[in-house]
Amino acid sequence: MAIARTLLPIVPKYLRMRRSQYANIATIEAEARRRLEETLRAAAKIPFYRERFGAAANAMELCECPILKRTDIPALNHSVRGRIGAGGVFFHENSSGSTGMPVEFLFGNDHQSGRYAARIRYLRASGWSPLRRNAWIVASTSRLDESPDARLVFSRLRMRSTFLRVIFRPFDVQADALIATRPEFFYTIPSNLDGLLEAFERRAVRLPSLRLIFTGGEVLDDSIRERARRILGVEIRDNYGSTEAFIAWQCPAARYHINAEHVAVEIVDDNDRAVAPGAMGRVLITTLENRVMPLIRYEIGDYALASDEQCPCGRTLPTIGKVVGRGINLFRMPEGPRVSPWPLIGPLRAREEIRQFQIVQEAHRRYRVRYVSDIELDVAARHDIHARFAAILGLELEVAFERTASIERTAGGKFMTALSNITE
């Protein structure tokens, strides 16, 4: 059975990861170094990397390697496929395209089993169990889909996990599906959870069986955490994952731990130098288990805060600070730096007449607020939002308002709460 062959290596990896998350720091760093050296040796066999690195590929320090851009991925993919030939065995998956450029990644079984083992570690750390009722509202898969994720969704091994294929349905429909499922654990993307919380609050209903919410795939704003506590009475455990790798996850002490057995993470400034702890920078990842198509210093398109904190939970895995968002979701100031859009969300969420919204930066000083509401915002409301935007950003700006019937989702079921149309 294909799904069993895929999942079988996960168990020993998960058991090792349970131990390694508490190993001493020197041991974790030595193991990461060993895996990096293996990754560089595997990369040296691929024509794309041989041309980039030259003869000294195996002896290079990671910080000396060229940064891999998203625009490089098609050429890397072509090089890998040419090397392994038509009979090669690998998994493949397309990115969601939320950056505007969907690309295809290839993976070996070691990478996939490592990603699943890290996911299980994340879920189990907060008490999740496949033997308890849990519901998942994520982008739907088809029985014709040959990916490991799809095979798991439709296999008997999912146990008491219910995959609700309703993410593109109205939030009231999703809420009804959750009420019928009576989950103890629930997983979805943050923007979808935001709409669900509004539906539960408006209808004054709760999920009495619910113990915890898991989120991933987007930036989780602190305001959503606060509303989940207030409306549903539960906490959220977030994770930072992508098509390329499962990067980090939030433990019960609320820190984000990097899956150091699976991926190396760098946070760098505009000059490609590591930023200081607490500073924001671009996220680079290096996969440590994918020998088929290793990604070395791949610029994933996200910005995050660097961290050197030790977690009070006792885990010694390195940590990462708050993930701020993708470059296209950050606003650009006239002087050039990027800033998080999340402070601007408060003035809009405070308006009871607005059910959903999207903030679009059209130019450095020009913004458009697209909103879903039964009524047009009056002059006083528009003036208040405009004034608060200007105060938060600290500059004179234009704010246009556009009432719309709905905010479109991406192909992966995500809402773009913030979007910048300013190109580099």
Image (cartoon, helix red, strand yellow):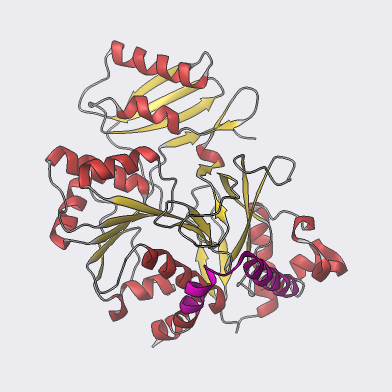
Residue at 30 percent across and 55 percent down: it is: 213
Q: Quadrant of the C terminus?
A: top right
Residue 106 shown left or right of residue 346 in the figure: right
- Is 48 located above or below residue 85 in the figure? above
- Is 37 located above or below residue 310 in the figure? below
Q: Nearer the viewer, residue 387 or 15?
A: 15
**Quarter of the image where one finds residue 287:** bottom right
Residue 242 belongs to the span the image colors magenta: no
Q: Residue furthest right?
A: 55
What is the x, y in percent for residue 195?
27, 42
Q: How many numbered marks, from 0 up?
A: 0
Q: Is residue 112 visible?
A: no
What is the x, y in percent for residue 242?
50, 58
Q: Which residues are magenta?
A: 13-41
What is the x, y in percent for residue 358?
38, 33
**Quarter of the image where one finds residue 342:** top left
Residue at 87 percent across and 69 percent down: it is: 55
What is the x, y in percent for residue 294?
65, 68
